[in-house]
Amino acid sequence: MRPRRVVQRILLYLAVGLVVTVVLVPYAWMISGSFKETLELQSSDVTVAGLRPTWIPRRPTLRNYREVNTSVPMLAYFRHSILISLGTMAVATVLALMAAYALSRFNFRGREIYTVSVLATQMLPGILFLIPYYLVFTTISRRTGVPLRDTYWGMIFTYTSFALPFSIVMLRSYMNGIPLEIDEQAMIDGCTRTRALWTVIVPLATPGIAAVAIYAFIMAWNEVLFASVLTGRVTRTVSVGIMDYVTATSSNWGGMMAACIVTGIPVLILFTAMQRYIVEGLVAGATKG
Amino acid sequence: MLGPSSARLGTKPGGTPVRKAGAVSGWSKRQHRTAYWMILPAVVAMMLVHYIPMMWGFYISLHDVNLFTMADWIHAPFIGLRNFVDAFNPSTTTGARALRALLNITLYSAVTVTAGYLIGLAVALLLNQQFWGRTFVRGLILLPYITPDSVAYKVWTFIFQSRIGILNRYLLQWGLVTEPPIWLIGPPALWAVVVASVWKGWPFSALILLAALQKIPQDLYEAARVDGASTWQQFRWITMPHLQSVTVTLLLMSILWNFNAFNQFYVMLGRDPGVAAEVPSTLILREAFTNLQYGIGSALSIILMLVLLVVTVVYLRVLRATAGAEEV
């Protein structure tokens, strides 16, 4: 029995090692590329023995980081993304909180239909909304003079409604875990419903609310399709802006890899901080509906 | 409660702690009104971005909305189903590519979903074992999932570069190819995107499946071992049945997500991925925002939606037919 167990353990660790390697290889290549000189990157050639691309930069440099903002206005893109993502986070969280509370605590007419329609929108292709959305809002802007394309408000509004379906579902399932007696007790003690929500339920649901907030932030930070059409000079976000490093006329791979790291870091920090709650929420969203 | 898939799929969004009839019937109209006020902002937001545009989308698909009529598109001439016919007219670039795009996305989805699920399942089973550093690895595998799409797919673009990419270096070094392949142009492009998408997609499957695995009561396995069941038998008769409902939901979600795939193609291959890697989303985006044929673009996106609908219905039918005998 014992030797067989040892072999099993070794195989287990080999498999774990393989998984970890597969996950990490692209990150290693990204980090390695971000420290390479432009000359090294451009002259490397897989067919020439001395010039093969290597994992360790031949002459490591910080230039890509220092000049991340030189050819591409990355800092401006970063500012746009922060503003849009924070705005989406704030608005989506408040709206989702109210809707989730209503769905969890009231048995109103149309509740089921509403829940189903919320879920259904998630399944439809984004491009289906994009064309009419673009045309409708171009017309509204022309008639009323309120610009929505390439404005912070327009982008926050758009992303909020994209973050809402999943946020509502996630938060509702979290609130369903809070016993109804707690609201009732608060209301017997003389709270109004609104006060019961803010002073009793919100503190209890904080982890769920935080998970939803971070989900909304990350969703807005990562979105590509709508950003590629609706943002322009004023609001271009990092997710789209990152592509400016390698175009038909320039190929600054080192700069792009540095920008990739800079773009990924906020998401990584937020996610790590709230990992437990988000994972719970994701699992609940996928299995409980 | 391991049978929640029906809820997710929309037959009955269940599981609320709201009291049954007795308590509810006592509630006043005022409370109904409070509920409506609370969902109102969310409803308005989704109305304006989802439902209303969708209805206008049908309208646009039946009208000749293009560069010339765009300024006053509401009064664009009604042309019936001509946009739908034109969308498949082989004498235009778009028409020639429309069928190919649907074919490509089907192939792409089939491979990506299958590979993502199988890898996710294998890793979930692995992470369900006891070993040193398990918590760390469990957090680590989520990295691809949380990395922004544009970052992950740009890094893969870099890996797949023909002359300066790390992949071709090893392929040449190990003698698997003699010439460095050009991955991101022509037929191989689709497979390059598949590889990147699988890398990014499997952690989600692993996460969901692992959560389901951990809910299986351990005494089932103990009882099976006492009865002399082999590891394979335990997997086949205990693990798989318990994963069935979660698998159903997971696969359906993956299929829908992958059919809608846009980011990976746009980021890795650009606005025009070429015939061999053209997919509906990129085709529609160009038709609407480069060729300014909004009508044809809308018609194509409605066709994409209908295809998704058919896929969903067929999937659920097949499922019901096969699951009919077993109680899930």
Image: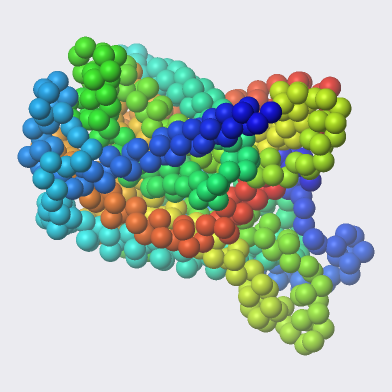
Check the image and tell me how it is coloured.
rainbow
Q: Decide which of A119, A75 is in the foreground and name it.
A: A75
How many labels, in total? 0
Residue depicted at 8% across the width and 32% down the height: A43
Residue depicted at 46% across the width and 36% down the height: A17
Q: Decide which of B265, A268 is in the foreground and name it.
A: A268
Q: Which residue reaches farthest right?
A: B22
Measured from the top left, where is residue B67 in percent x and y?
27, 37
Question: In which quadrant is the C terminus of chain B drawn?
Answer: top right
- Residue A44 against residue B34 in the figure, above or below: above
Measured from the top left, where is residue A22 in percent x and y?
41, 35
- Is B132 placed left or right of A23 in the picture? right
Residue depicted at 28% across the width and 27% down the height: B167
Measured from the top left, where is residue A68 in percent x and y?
17, 54
- Is A124 placed left or right of B189 in the picture? right
Question: Can residue B101 be seen at all in this image of the molecule?
Answer: yes
Q: Decide which of A30, A121 is in the foreground and name it.
A: A30
Residue depicted at 66% across the width and 72% down the height: A204
Q: Decide which of A27, A15 is in the foreground and name it.
A: A15
Measured from the top left, where is residue B77 in percent x and y?
39, 34
